[in-house]
Image (cartoon, rainbow, N blue to C red):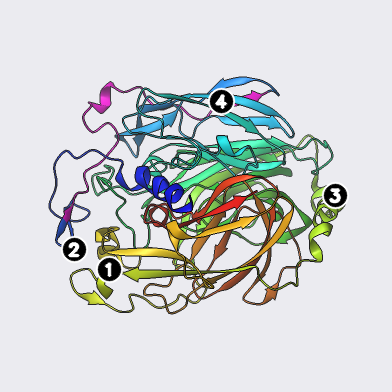
Amino acid sequence: MKNLSLSLLLIPILLTGCASGSYTMMHNRGGMMGNNQVQTTDLLPGQNEDSSSLPEATPSSVIDVQDGQTISLNPTMVRKIINGKEIAMYGYNGEIPGPLLKVKQGSTFTVNVTNNIDLPTSVHWHGLRLDNASDGAVGLTQKEIAPHGSFTYTVKVPDEGIYWYHTHVREDLQQPMGLYGNILVIPADAEAYNPVNRDEVLAVTDLLLDRNGDAIPYGTSQADHTLMGRFGNTMLVNGQTDYKLDVFKGDVVRFYLTNTANTRTFRFNFGRAKMKLVGSDNGRYEQEQFVDSVTLSPSERVIVDVLFDKSGNYTFSHQTPDRSYTLGTVTVSSNSTMTSYAARFVQLASHADVSKDIDAFRSSFGKAPDHTLVLDMNMMGGRMMGGHGGMMGEIPKDGIEWEDTMGMMNATAMGNMMQWKMIDQATGAANKDLMYTAKVGDKVKIRIINKKDSAHPMQHPIHFHGQRFLVLSDNGVQTKDFVWKDTVLVPAGHTVDILLDANNPGDWMFHCHIAEHLSNGMMGLLKVQ
């Protein structure tokens, strides 16, 4: 059963595509050679259509979803103008990002999806503890939605917080090309958060464009860039290259930030503005804290309150150890805000209800791991890229590759050359053969070891579908301020312990959320009975 489920799951991820010719050189839309097979990279949205005939993508709208309501989210072909260039892309309901769904905690709603794009697809409701049948994992919980086909999801939102929905077929292609959107779950308790002057939901990603501003094609039948993942060179905030926000002096703005990129880890800040960390993937922290920046790996979310107490321009940035990227600008008026929440902002709130929820798990923090999961890489035949074998990189000081440091090798890396692996240390079972079992109510401690002597050590964001967990420690440093998570960043060479709350029955994927690593087979199965 486990082999069948995971094997079926790999089929649409690895094989979906349509061949229509080949090219000659790497990022110049090139054929890629590996194991004596030419791998073509010529797949783009709507490549057989005139992009000018497609409807122009519109910005994300807001749908206030009521309990019991039925809505539609339809993947569609669109054209989008980025830096003056028209690009054929995908969008939900013609929007990039897809509509922001605002829904009250505890609600259940229905989503009808009709696939109007040129590839099979599905919708995964990332982070939500919904029923297994609506998880969107093709080959495991549903069949792919073929072009012109339809599927109906029942979406439950038991937890407050910021979540997102995205494709789960050829995620390496469809997601960066527009198939993603946010879900804001409003707490049932109206006093759960401090008041703020406004909310901003921001989905941040990057897109790889060539020197002419055109999208660089993707692997025809499988993901390319499988070594490090496809780093983009154009940053987008809510689909725009020039995000702008106007506020009054003294405003406190609550930002809900989501990293929807394929592989890039972001480190966000708002310049000299004071920032307070309030929540993460699945709601609020036990204790709020002031921070200088927040780091998000692919699929992670954070909630931060930012006080703009002086007039002028503030830069919303992504800052790596070596360079800074401007993502947008917040312009603060010289006019003061009508209602000031500055006094509440400087107070670091504690959330007794969050701590009480976690209390039932504290007695399991110190137990021995139930499972040890090793993250590694396997070279096909022990060699890579036409004879280059052995180590392909050193561990970065902070365990994170912020940029594509091996551009040529990364661009030409295809799945038949190498395989990323998730391995159970006790049994040696890996990827499609890797299965963990639990019963509803189990508290499962998992130790995740990201091997420092991997052929290419790099970070991996590990995501569990349909469940939540607590991060207990990173390299032996114990967590002091807890928050519920569904994705954890495991830097290269690090060992991270998590405690999983197995309370949602069904067959659930867990995987690396670097899209190209997922497509390369880096996934396992969790059966909660």
In whole angstroms, how far apart are the C-alphas of marks 2 and 1? 8 Å
In whole angstroms, how far apart are the C-alphas of marks 4 and 3? 31 Å
Circle 1 crowding by C-alpha within 10 Å: few under 14, some 14–19, many from 20 = some
Residue beneath disc 1: 380
CB contact under 8 Å: marks 2 and 1: yes
Q: Amino acid at mark 2?
A: Asn
- Report the span colored magenta: 38-65
Residue beneath disc 2: 35
User: Helix, strand, or loop for circle 2?
Assistant: loop
- Mark before the other along the chain sequence, 4 or 1: 4
Residue beneath disc 3: 353
In whole angstroms, how far apart are the C-alphas of marks 3 and 2? 56 Å
- Mark before the other along the chain sequence, 3 or 2: 2
- Mark before the other along the chain sequence, 4 or 3: 4
In whole angstroms, how far apart are the C-alphas of marks 2 and 4? 43 Å
Image coords of residue 323 (percent x, y): 45, 64
Majority secondary structure of magenta residues: loop
Q: Answer above or below: position of 528 versus 186.
A: below
Q: Amino acid at mark 3?
A: Asp
Residue beneath disc 4: 111
Circle 2 crowding by C-alpha within 10 Å: few under 14, some 14–19, many from 20 = few
Q: Answer above or below: position of 459 versus 131.
A: below
CB contact under 8 Å: marks 2 and 4: no
Image coords of residue 495 (percent x, y): 58, 73
User: Helix, strand, or loop for circle 4?
Assistant: strand
User: Helix, strand, or loop for circle 3?
Assistant: helix
